[in-house]
Image (cartoon, rainbow, N blue to C red):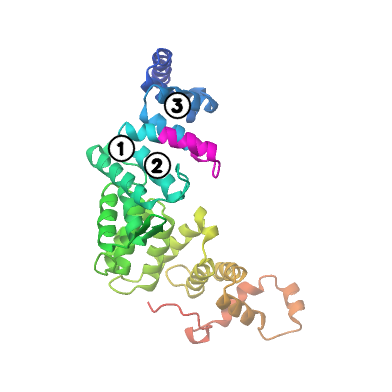
Amino acid sequence: EYGQNNLNDSIAYFKKAAAQGQPEALFYLGTLCRRRVNGLRKSKAYDYFERAAEQGHFGACNIMGNKHYRSKGNSVEDKIAWKWYSKAAKGGNAAGNISLGSMLEDGRGPSKRKDYFEALERYKKAAEIEDEDEEQTADTSAWTRLADIYFKGRTCSSGTIGKNFEMAADYFEKGAKKQDARAMSGLGHCYLEGKGREKNHAQALIWFEKAAKKNIFEALLCSADLYYEGANGVVQDLGKAVKYYHRAMEHTAYKQCADDQDIEFKVAQCYLHGSGVERDFSEAMRFMKLSSNHGGEKAKQFLREIAAEPKKNGSRTQKRRENPCREQQAKFRFKTEKELIKLELPAE
């Protein structure tokens, strides 16, 4: 009751201050509306943010820019987004500079052409602001944006920014120290591939697992793969590999994953062999079928072998009618490793 009364008092105070045009109060009311706190309407959030932005609240300027930037390919909306982001950037807002850099990379700035050089300058400015004011560090740090450009290299009409793995690794590390999960994953790749850092799979795993805790999709996959293979200084742990694969399969990015059939096949192998998990033939079959449906040739081979099981005591159709659990009972055919179809499970 005390907390609710306190919240009511706070909202009443913010409304009074907002009526006087105080930008901070307008911004907080917008934030509370966005979260639907205490019955406040979400539809009113942008009204408050716009009023705060007009009063010079640079965080609100960036939010207003985001509102218009989401309308992809709309040049009118892009102009409005650029206006708000520019206002935020001029006020020393790191996120505003990052947003301008992103628009320039996407070719949605005033020139309508990709300009990686100008984007680089925006990210550098944002990185300086982040270093001076930790509270302004964005979810994706400016250091991470810089690292991405130097790690991959970029070409546009203004010229080419060549790859520089040492700089990329240094920038990823700076972003990682600011708890940017994408930077942690990027630094993991530097160690994994020996780009900008001496190749070290154990060190790569440390950074991938840090990023995996923040649910970065590629970090979940890389952590799983390193534990699955168990080489180059990483101790194999199929139990952890399966857990990471499961988390990756639950991720929204999994639908666009090109390696889905391989992941499902690996998980199926573990259940089939009882490696790292309790042996479960029904789960093995479930993942084999998923892999097969996604084009996995090894899974298709396995399912063909199951389907070609010798007929006993009548036709296969009759057996299915008599025994609906046939697939589960088929596991008793596989009594030893030699009897298993060659599934390339890494040696434990």
Up the image or down, 41 lies above or below 341; here it is above
Task: Specify the quadrant that holds the C terminus.
Answer: bottom left
* Residue 125 image point, x, y percent: 28, 42
Up the image or down, 118 lies above or below 261; here it is above
Residue 49 numbered mark, or none: 3
| Span shown in magenta | 68-85
Amino acid type of the residue tagged 2 in the rendering: Leu
Do the CB atoms of the residues marked 2 and 3 lie less than 8 Å apart? no
Name the quadrant containing residue 153: bottom left
Q: Residue at x 45, y 26 (%)?
A: 49
* Residue 131 image point, x, y percent: 23, 42
Kindly state the secondary structure of the residue where label 1 is placed. helix
Nearer to us: label 2 or label 3: 2
The residue nearer to you, when weighing 236 against 118, is 118
- According to the picture, the residue beneath numbered tag 1 turns out to be 136
The answer to whether residue 208 shows anywhere in this view is: no
The residues bearing labels 1 and 2 have C-alpha atoms spaced at a distance of 16 Å
Task: Give the left or right position of residue 185, taking residue 49 as reference.
Answer: left
Dot 2, crowdedness within 10 Å: few (<14), some or many (≥20)? Answer: many
